[in-house]
Amino acid sequence: MKPATLKTLSLTAVVALMTAEAAWAADPLPSWKGTAPKKAVVAFVEKVTKEGAPDFVPAPERVAVFDNDGTLWAEQPMYFQFQFALGRIKALAPQHPEWKDNEPFASLLKGDLKTVLAGGEPAIFEIVMATHAGMTTEEFENTVTDWIATAKHPKTGRLYTEMVYQPMLELLAYLRANRFKTFIVSGGGIEFMRPWTERVYGIPPEQVVGSSGKLKFEMRDGKPVLVKLPEVDLIDDKEGKPVGIQSHIGRRPVMAFGNSDGDLQMLQWTTAGSGPRFALIVHHDDAEREWAYDRQSHIGMLDKAWDEANARGWTVVSMKDDWKTIFLK
Amino acid sequence: MKPATLKTLSLTAVVALMTAEAAWAADPLPSWKGTAPKKAVVAFVEKVTKEGAPDFVPAPERVAVFDNDGTLWAEQPMYFQFQFALGRIKALAPQHPEWKDNEPFASLLKGDLKTVLAGGEPAIFEIVMATHAGMTTEEFENTVTDWIATAKHPKTGRLYTEMVYQPMLELLAYLRANRFKTFIVSGGGIEFMRPWTERVYGIPPEQVVGSSGKLKFEMRDGKPVLVKLPEVDLIDDKEGKPVGIQSHIGRRPVMAFGNSDGDLQMLQWTTAGSGPRFALIVHHDDAEREWAYDRQSHIGMLDKAWDEANARGWTVVSMKDDWKTIFLK
């Protein structure tokens, strides 16, 4: 090792920390109004990072987990990954003439999303598997990378990666500056998220937990590849979220952030730990700037988790009343 | 955030880096002799960390994966986790009278390890499942923590955590000082390793990949728990290692370290990536200070991976000739 490298590193670290210091001294969360949720977040972070205080949490244990769809980026009128899968189905349809007579593919190709969704999780699963299985992980990554760089949201016309929430980006940065390790724990596909989460959220692939299919190692033309099989490995939603957390992280989070009943068990698991724990729910109640939906929605239903949040004093963010800005600036 | 916290942090960081600098300026790997393997490791690390150089690898992509049994700690005369399971079987035997008539338990209880091992992986799997399944993850963690704090190796009489290799501890620290993220990728149980890898290797639970059983989230007395099920999730050995790497890390390692045929696919997967890659095999050839075994061994067989290492120019460490010290000092 060259001493010069270390000297450069340490200087860079100092400059980075001082710059951060100046910005955050003013306001670590400028897109959050000064209402109760912001106060609760800041009070919690100050309490667990104060060395010697009764609620101090050592840095290696500072794990914060975030749902993705509806928590870090939008999810209406349809999970964005579903839009991706739909594009794949259309592209692959010529090679699958049988799809015109089989559900959920037939309805999907006719643009009848309501019938597709009536098929529930099994229908969605079949679509995902049909469009992912058989590809190598590298091929799939390339397909996602191409799509995410160009596909636009049907309503806003923006790139999907521009439909991330500015207040949550600030929150991720604030937690990391306080030596939290930030993880995504999403029902979405792990390999659908990893190609872009580092660039968009600053969350590296090894800190992304999501639903996954089984993989098989094999040699193709003398080169090792991993092939995606049409078998579920983990559905990282509801009861699956604590399982995904244990499998990938191996320690209980200190803070958890979600927006729907799919996050309930993750919030329960997080807050059931001893010592200080924090749970927050993003409530979509801003029809003007985003969407308004909760108890009756098929996508992102917030019903049981909302009741539990109220009963247990978890923090609930009103997007309308607590956020100055919603989307990425 | 309090500015004072950041100021303290940055000073600590500077002091830590300067201390490291002083030590490493002398020799980053004092327990390694100045032979070819040490030169190869240092040359590779210098090459990929030199900004602007053709082989530069950005810090977030610096992933190094380490096998555990036989690579970071010893594995003879029996994988240490097997010693743990054996203790559990003896403790649980009174509740399982049927074990005296059923293999592999009958032989195990008689101390006839040879017959047990003749049953191969299925027998080992049955023992592991019998001793782990039905427990919550917290109960299991407590059992491991108790065992690892007190159990002694049958030959050396040392704690198992004292039977880790000093040269590999230095290597882990050296790589981390060069901003590598170090991961364990082991055939051993993920939940068997996580309770102690941070303390012993400086590797946190979220950077431990291993074999795993399925987990189930449930409520017990109103408290959420994760219960270990008697079903395999992943056998993180041989073809399973690249699968475990993809599932947990999601990017291809730059450096990989192993000692047996169980590591072959991990080394193949690592070195098949584009750009600079490094593979190293620890060869157990020191019967005096440790154990000598390779092609004929049931535990830690090194045969195909050795041939491939020679054919492809991977680095092979002779414990006898390349290491000054073997065990933790």
Image (spheres, coloured by chain):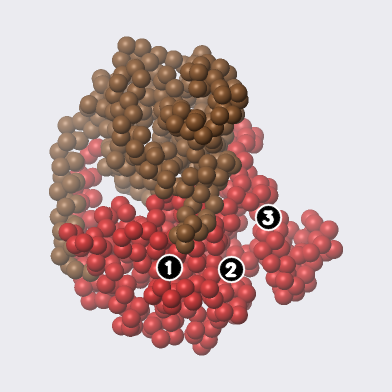
Chain colours: A red, B brown
Q: Secondary structure beneath disc 3?
A: helix
Residue A22: percent from the left, percent from the top? 20, 70
Quadrant the N terminus of chain A occupies = top left
Left or right, residue A261 beside residue A324: right
Tell me the amino acid under the disc marked 3: Met
Tell me the amino acid under the disc marked 2: Phe
**Residue position for label 1:** A257
Q: Out of B58 and B287, give the one closest to the viewer.
A: B287
Residue at image x 31%, y 45%? B179
Circle 3 crowding by C-alpha within 10 Å: few under 14, some 14–19, many from 20: some
Q: Out of A228 and B81, give the one closest to the viewer.
A: B81
The reply to whether dot 2 and dot 1 touch (C-beta < 8 Å) is no
Left or right, residue B59 beside residue A286: left
Q: Secondary structure beneath disc 2?
A: helix
* Co-location on one chain, circles 3 and 1: yes
Residue at image x 25%, y 29%? B29
Q: Secondary structure beneath disc 1?
A: strand
User: N-terminal of the two: label 3 or label 1?
Assistant: 3
Instruction: Using the image, tell me which numbered label, if any, was put on residue A80.
Output: 2
**What distance separates the C-alpha of mark 3 from that of mark 2?**
16 Å
Instruction: Using the image, tell me which numbered label, if any, was put on residue A129.
Output: 3
Q: Quadrant of residue B200?
A: top left
Residue at image x 48%, y 65%? A67
Circle 2 crowding by C-alpha within 10 Å: few under 14, some 14–19, many from 20: many
* Co-location on one chain, circles 2 and 1: yes
Tell me the amino acid under the disc marked 1: Phe
Residue at image x 35%, y 78%? A37
Numbered disc in front, either 3 or 1:
1
Residue A196: percent from the left, percent from the top? 49, 60
User: N-terminal of the two: label 3 or label 2?
Assistant: 2
